[in-house]
DNA sequence: GAGGAGATCGTCT
DNA sequence: GACGATCTCCTCT
């Protein structure tokens, strides 16, 4: 599959707060096919969301928010539509979006994206050599995995945690370009030990950019 | 292509 | 002090 042509994300209207103020499972499913946008100077990086995981809050043992609010996870308890970025395994950032109304914990982890534009900047950020004509096989290295996509988009806790993804002023947000996934698969989440059996991972069926399976 | 192990450090107990 | 919502490299098949 070739990279999708840039479907005129020119509207560049961030998804509204209401979109995120719902159950993370609903938000997860609806986020599939949406486009993550990073605006830096005049450069634009865009990529389609093809894999996410829902984390449900205090009823979900696998969620960071399971044991209550801490200095790290406070964003999950705040208003919807904020970015929650955390550092893991000593070398990776993971990028989440807070869900549910203010005061209720919940979030969605972005696990894989399909690059659309700004591919050279992503490759540079990932420190790998690649270009817009590269095969899918190579492009997967850019954004197929939570740590990879965070690095490709330059997402760090220092820069992006608690960022309002619903603001038109933001340099990081998510838009709807009209694409609708033909089919969505739901599977258990990856890389967790608690509540590992719950089907809370959502992927665009058949998409080559999902991180596994 | 699949599987295993090391790297590496913030967070929480 | 232990663990973790991961990635990459290396080895084996």
Image (spheres, coloured by chain):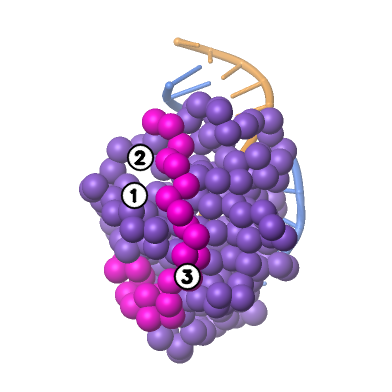
Chain colours: A purple, B blue, C orange
Q: Do the residues marked 1 and 3 share a common chain?
A: yes
> Residue A128, position in %: x, y?
68, 34
> Residue A20, position in %: x, y?
40, 75
The stretch in magenta equals A1-27
Q: Are marks 1 and 2 in contact (CB under 8 Å)?
A: yes
A75 to the left or right of A104: right
- Determine if the magenta segment contains residue A116: no
User: In front: A39, or A205?
Assistant: A39
Q: Quadrant of the C terminus of chain A?
A: top left
Q: Which residue is mark 2?
A: A207
Q: CA distance from mark 1 to mark 2?
A: 8 Å
User: Could you tell me which secondary element the residue under label 1 belongs to?
Assistant: strand
Dot 2: chain letter: A
Q: Residue at x 67, y 54 (%)?
A: A43
Above or below for A82 versus A176? below
Q: Residue at x 50, y 76 (%)?
A: A166
Dot 3: chain letter: A
Q: Earlier in the sequence, mark 1 or mark 3?
A: 3
Q: Residue at x 72, y 68 (%)?
A: A158
User: Could you tell me which secondary element the residue under label 3 belongs to?
Assistant: loop
Above or below for A151 versus A98? above
Q: CA distance from mark 2 to mark 3?
A: 25 Å
Q: Are marks 1 and 3 in contact (CB under 8 Å)?
A: no
Q: Residues within 10 Å of mark 2 (few under 14, many from 20)?
A: some
Q: Do the residues marked 1 and 2 share a common chain?
A: yes
Nearer to us of marks 2 and 3 is 3
The reply to whether residue A124 is in sight is yes
Q: Quadrant of the N terminus of chain A?
A: top left
Q: Residues within 10 Å of mark 1 (few under 14, many from 20)?
A: many
Where residue A203 is drawn, which disc sits there? 1
A32 to the left or right of A109: left
Where residue A13 is drawn, which disc sits there? 3
């Amino acid at each position: 599959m070739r990279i999708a042509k840039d479907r005129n994300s020119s509207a560049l209207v961030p998804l509204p707060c209401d979109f995120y103020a719902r159950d993370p499972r609903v938000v997860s499913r609806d986020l599939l096919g949406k486009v993550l946008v990073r605006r830096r100077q005049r450069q634009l990086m865009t990529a389609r969301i093809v894999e996410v995981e829902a984390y449900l809050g205090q009823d979900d043992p696998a969620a960071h928010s399971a044991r209550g609010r801490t200095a790290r996870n406070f964003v999950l308890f705040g208003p919807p539509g904020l970015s929650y970025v955390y550092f893991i395994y000593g070398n990776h950032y993971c990028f989440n979006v807070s869900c549910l109304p203010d005061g209720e914990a919940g979030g969605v982890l972005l696990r894989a994206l399909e690059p659309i534009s700004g591919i050279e900047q992503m490759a540079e950020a990932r420190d790998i050599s690649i270009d817009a004509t590269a095969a899918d096989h190579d492009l997967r290295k850019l954004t197929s995995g939570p740590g990879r996509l965070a690095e490709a988009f330059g997402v760090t806790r220092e820069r992006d945690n608690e960022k309002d993804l619903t603001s038109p002023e933001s340099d990081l947000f998510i838009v709807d370009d009209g694409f609708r996934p033909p089919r969505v698969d739901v599977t258990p989440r990856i890389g967790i030990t608690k509540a590992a059996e719950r089907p809370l991972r959502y992927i665009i069926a058949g998409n080559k950019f999902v991180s596994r399976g």
